[in-house]
Image (cartoon, helix red, strand yellow):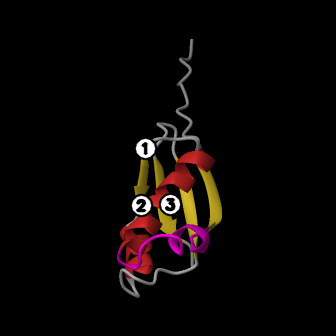
Amino acid sequence: MAEKKKEVKKELTERVYTIPLRKKTVKTVKYKRSPKAIKLIREFLKKHMKSDNVIIDKKVNEKVWARGIKSPPGKVKVKAVKDSTGKVIATLEE
């Protein structure tokens, strides 16, 4: 008899989000806006991808911090990929 090999299926959920940052960052103190924006991206992805393990790529961080601590962008376009273990990786969508 031929043995059947179990197929390992890696389920990837891939979505593109435009994350609005302006409403929340404008209400914070000027010298804490970029750190707040990074926290907002992480919270947004936790909520929408339903995972507690969120990793933000270096390029997304550089995009937020490009204009300094006082003036992060109003919105960021991010591609989020969730693997079968529940880990979400956010990369910059270009």
Q: CA distance from mark 2 to mark 1?
A: 10 Å
Residue 5 is a magenta residue: no
The answer to whether residue 32 is left or right of residue 43 is left
Q: What percent of the width, then of the height, locates residue 41?
A: 50, 61
Residue 22 is a magenta residue: yes
Q: What percent of the width, then of the height, locates residue 4?
A: 56, 20
Q: Determine which of the numbered discs, if any, sits on residue 40 in the image.
A: 3
Question: Image quadrant of residue 11?
Answer: top right
Residue position for label 1: 53
Q: Which residues are magenta?
A: 20-31
> What's the residue at 49%, 39% (across, down)?
86
Q: Which mark is first along the chain, 2 or 3?
A: 3
Judge the density around disc 3: few (<14), some (14-19), many (≥20) Cα neighbours within 10 Å. Answer: some
Answer above or below: position of 2 versus 53.
Answer: above
Q: CA distance from mark 3 to mark 2?
A: 11 Å
Secondary element at image label 1: loop
- The amino acid beneath tag 2 is Ile
Nearer to us in this view, 22 or 86: 22
- The amino acid beneath tag 1 is Asn
Residue position for label 2: 56
Callout 3–callout 2 Cβ contact below 8 Å = no
Judge the density around disc 1: few (<14), some (14-19), many (≥20) Cα neighbours within 10 Å. Answer: some
